[in-house]
Amino acid sequence: RQFFAKSPEREREILEAFVEYASQEQNAVFLSISGSHFERRVILARLEAHGLSGNFKGRIEDVYWAVENHVALPIPSLQLNDVASYLGYKYRHPELSGKAIPSEYNKYVRKPKASLRKRLLEYNEDDVMSLRYVVRKLTGTL
């Protein structure tokens, strides 16, 4: 499931939808791979900024250290795109990176275009599905 705010002013609405989704998925664990709990920190900070809470705070898991401590790969970094690409995941927009996405989103906000929205959603889907791919590949469940 994807959540997309058409403007920053709609952030609260999207976060409310995410909290509702998370509350319906009681056993779900939300995975990330940053090594710094970036997603957990950012999501929880944005929820707090809007006075929202959810029962999933302990369900956001950063798998970076599990990968680093248990896998040796001949690649320059353990960034998700490097690991997933090495393991065979095919990105639709390999020229994009997580660092470029805020700028791309700001372009969309300034001048909404269906093609840019599609590109952002495809990047997001690849980001999520590539992490799933990596976890399954490394645990032998793919």
Image (spheres, rainbow, N blue to C red):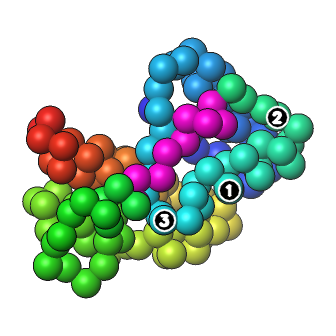
Magenta stretch in the rendered image: 56-64
Quadrant in which residue 136 is drawn: top left
Along the polypeptide, which appears first: circle 3 or circle 2? 3
Circle 1 crowding by C-alpha within 10 Å: few under 14, some 14–19, many from 20: few
Q: Are marks 1 and 2 in contact (CB under 8 Å)?
A: no
Residue type at tag 3: Gly
Query: In this orientation, which residue lies closer to the viewer: 108 or 91?
Result: 91
In the image, residue 131 lies in the stretch drawn in magenta: no
For residue 24, above or below residue 18: above
The x, y position of residue 142, in whole percent, is: 12, 38
Query: In this orientation, which residue lies closer to the viewer: 119 or 53?
Result: 53
Secondary structure category for the residue under label 1: helix
The x, y position of residue 95, in whole percent, is: 31, 76
Q: Are marks 1 and 3 in contact (CB under 8 Å)?
A: no
Residue tagged 1: 42
Residue pictured at 49% horizontal, 75% vertical:
100
